[in-house]
Amino acid sequence: MPLNACELEIDLFCRGMRVPDAVPLDGARGISRTRAGLGSGLEVVLPTGSWLKPQIWVNIPVVERFAQASPYVLTGTLGAGYAIHDDRDGSRYPIRIPREPAWYHRLTSRDVPMNRVGVLQGTYLGIYVNPVCAFWHYEPKLNCRFCTTGANVGDAEVVEKAIEDVIETCHAAKQESGITFVHLNGGFHGSNGIRPILPYVRTIKERVGLLVGVQLAPEKDFARYDELVDAGVDHLSFCVEFQDPEWFERVCPGKARMLSQDLYFDAMAYAARRLPHGAVSGEIIAGIEPLEATLVAIERIVELGAFPTVCIFRPTVGSDMADWPPPRYEDMRLVMTKVYDACRRHRIPIGAAPNIEVSIVVNPDDTALLAERTFAFYRYEAWRRAVRLAAGPMFRLRMRPRARRKSGTTEPPAAPANTADAA
């Protein structure tokens, strides 16, 4: 029986896809081995045929070892159109492969290729703004075992992004690709923390006019989040990764030793109080720790007023966990069903922000396609639609370039910038 678009998205994350040499991909977005490596697949758009949302973006694993045994095969051509064929039952899923934007290979005024500054992952722009996460510099290394930032930053992307390069890249992505959201992330940098990212946030808000998200290691001094809010940040995310303490320490040794699991949740709770409901997310990885722990983490995150961004584990090429098996589809479908149910019960306004489709995770609003059609479902969907309409003017206001602030001035309150973002 054919899968719906969200079910297909989940299964593609779990099984990957084969791309025969005979299938031409000229003009498609290239595989971007940047940031933590989650975007190292083929960008594809799945039509849903549903009133809930018209399409789903997914970055399909195609180079990992497990993908070579996938039952899914890409077929078609640019002229005739593409489809994904399932060898198991003969199902055929028409898809769209987005084109690589022209600005990718344009140079900034400092002669830096723009795609070495930031890349599209779905419809948003991702930029790793800090130098390589300090966990990679310890001996022995304390990097998260699923991450490839230490191999990517300085190779596929420049190590340090000058503010002017970031601004020019944001301008190009906004004008030519229609982005509304830029996600600035980085790793652990000790006491430097958030402060180096503040000029990027302020300058993007003043000179470009975009929704801006930030994802960094949690601060022990929570007052630093007030500085980010004052700078105009629209979204904060916290990569706690795991609920189970043993798995947290085993897979994320640097986070466990230098930060602690509790700090992630405490910082998330503080940020959720400082930003509007639904403007903060907690990121976790599904498919490594026991399934029950992941379900507990989802509930814990929504109870704080944040929304869960759940990454389906990808054994990325070059990572310490490259040879680990991917998770089972049945388990991941259960996890994503839990995401929708938890957001519905806690009235998290998922999908409220305009034109933010993240291809490297299952977006929380994608999971509506998994939900049972009950009265509670239709009531929540009606409420979500009302929230989107009501928040529209505020988002448009926050996406205007703003004048440089003077002392004593105030900014309009942040609107709920629901995004599903990951490094």
Image (tube, rainbow, N blue to C red):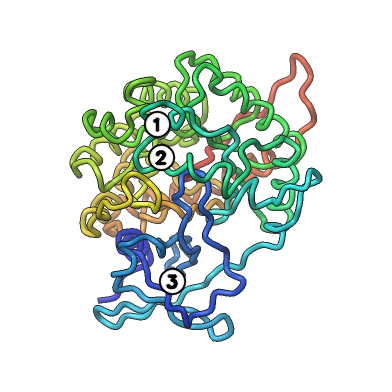
Of the numbered discs in the image, which one, if any, rests on residue 348?
2
Crowding near the residue tagged with mark 1, few <14, some 14–19, many ≥20 C-alpha atoms within 10 Å: many
The residue lying at 71 percent from left, 62 percent from top is 102
Residue 228, compared with residue 87, is above or below; it is above
- Precedes in sequence: disc 3 or disc 2: 3
Name the one closer to the observer, 385 or 284.
Answer: 284
Secondary structure under tag 1 reads loop
Q: What residue type is labelled 2?
A: Ile
Q: Can residue 36 be seen here?
A: yes
Asked which secondary structure carries label 3, the reply is loop
| Quarter containing the N terminus | bottom left
Residue type of the residue flagged with mark 3: Gly
> Residue 177 appears at what percent x and percent y?
67, 58
Please tell me which residue is depicted at 45% across the width and 15% down the height of the picture: 220
- Residue on which the image places disc 3: 49
Q: Distance between the residues labelled 3 and 2?
A: 24 Å
Q: How crowded is mark 3: few (under 14 residues within 10 Å), some or many (20 or more)?
A: few
Residue 305 has which mark?
A: 1
Q: Which amino acid, by three-letter code, is at mark 1? A: Gly
Across and down, in percent, residue 78 comes to: 57, 80
Q: Which residue lies furthest to the front in this view?
A: 139
